[in-house]
Amino acid sequence: MDVGFPSLEESHIAIVGLGLMGGSFALALRQAGLGRKLIGIDLDEGARTQAAPYFDVVAADLEPIRQAHLVVLAAPVRAILRLLQGIERYAAPGAILLDFGSTKRAILEAMRRLPEHLQPIGGHPLCGREQSGFAAATPDLFRGARFVLIPLARTSPQALDFVEALLRRLEMTPLIMSAEEHDQLLAVTSHLPYLLAACLMQVALENEKMQERLFQVAASGFRDTSRLAASHPRMMLDILMTNREPVLEALRSFQQALSLLQTRLEEGQEAALEGWMEAIRQQRRRLNL
Amino acid sequence: MDVGFPSLEESHIAIVGLGLMGGSFALALRQAGLGRKLIGIDLDEGARTQAAPYFDVVAADLEPIRQAHLVVLAAPVRAILRLLQGIERYAAPGAILLDFGSTKRAILEAMRRLPEHLQPIGGHPLCGREQSGFAAATPDLFRGARFVLIPLARTSPQALDFVEALLRRLEMTPLIMSAEEHDQLLAVTSHLPYLLAACLMQVALENEKMQERLFQVAASGFRDTSRLAASHPRMMLDILMTNREPVLEALRSFQQALSLLQTRLEEGQEAALEGWMEAIRQQRRRLNL
């Protein structure tokens, strides 16, 4: 069967992985009235039970994705890598495979090895929250977010158009770049911030006798700076292990910045400190995040 | 004149420094109907003009604080240290001096040198925002926040009761501790997070050619982790310079945590990484911040 590309409303969409991201995507599709048939796949029975009311079909195996024009892989990076091995036995010829993985080089490499009759596209929705699982899913998660798309050399313009149109209908902004660029950028904007948050928590937890008081005096600054420390470990481990070099590079840059700061503080270089703090402040304010 | 302690409603309250904190405190007092006479002091004419509608008296010099039962010093730490030099020439005998400084050892030392007829109490409202100036002031800033109080050995129970009652009426929770404990705790919960946020911004700004893309892919994680980088440099510089040893100690602990993490990542110690991430996550979730 060559499925071709029906309208967004008429398409059959399979979502593999019914956690926070896959679940939120399904809810957003339902809210927007997109996808005539939604197929949900998850190994976990609890997830399938929670998700069932929002899907036409739920299953524990990949068999039903044969019916899909678009197959979305929403799982931690290395689970996606495992799913990509042999997915050609299930996906229909011409079907689009879009993933939601947080790092992209390893996934794009695996996608390049898929048979030519599939239309793989790398993807990464730039949104998330610390809660995980279908129970935390919300149709609003993606709204207003940017979505990185990484087409392969062989991805047809029609397949890319289909995905871009779908994202725009869900009020996301597609952002096309290479897997290498994505992984380098995210090492700085996402993976490094996670590691800083986790190490900050570590420092806060080290002094046991100050513990109780410490969290009594922790205000919004600590709350925000440490927020990412609650990210899902399995997801984060996959990110770190598939993006080691860019993450280590970002860590080295950070350690250099910290060392310079430490020296200036030890030596009481007030003018240098203040100039630096002022420049950083202005740049941060300019971001308007 | 020995001013004694009238009711919270009947008291005269002077606020020295009409920025975000002093301004918000005045607005909160007005909203709660506390303070029969509010006196606002600031060297900056613009601040006085903005604040004037909410005060009975505004002035550029300390002269009018003679009339106050309570004098609040709301300024960067080293500005408070300068204000404390010679304040006995203005404050009435028996008047309470409460400061809002972000570090406490240096201020408490200066307070201990004040004449016995004054009632100094160290204070630190555990709240804030990145905006500064009276224009950013809001009566809600303090509501629900904790407020560290550091009485001196000589502070009378009546003076402490007065301040505690005032804070409670403004819906703050007083937290009594020593200056040393405060400064050590805040080095971890506030000053270190600021430095991490600033160094994260520094790393993000280093790669000029990735710049534009970088901030396009920066999502809520980067936003929150870098938020404190927009803190006011003058305020932060005073904090760092008056709390150097605890801050350097926190920095060293952080660098150790980061180095260990780096080694584990370089060596691909997945089990150790995952165990650590899981423990950190659970602790962060337990905080309920």
Image (cartoon, coloured by chain):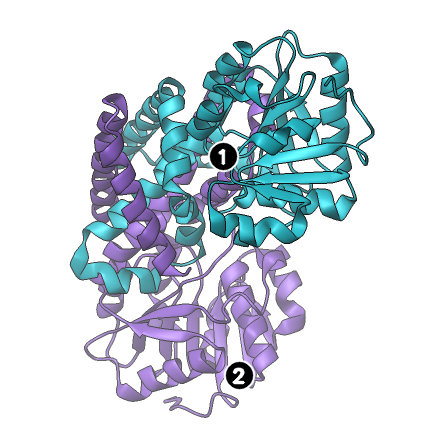
Chain colours: A cyan, B purple
Along the viewing direction, whichever of B269 and B200 lies nearer the viewer: B269
Left or right: B205 in relation to A244: right
| Residues flagged by tags 1 and 2 on a common chain | no
Up-down relation of residue B253 to residue A111 (above or below): below
Q: Quadrant of the N terminus of chain A?
A: top right
Q: Of discs 1 and 2, which sits in the foreground?
A: 1
Q: Residue at x 58, y 23 (%)?
A: A90
Q: Position of residue B144 (x, y in %)?
A: 47, 71
Label 2: chain letter? B
Disc 1 residue type (three-letter): Ala
Name the disc covering residue B35, or none: 2
Q: Residue at x 49, y 15 (%)?
A: A110
- Residue A54 placement, left or right of B1: right
Q: Residue B81's spot in the image, x, y percent? A: 33, 58
Q: Write the residue at 83% across / 29% down.
A: A7
Image-quadrant location for residue B200:
top left
Mark sitting on residue A75: 1
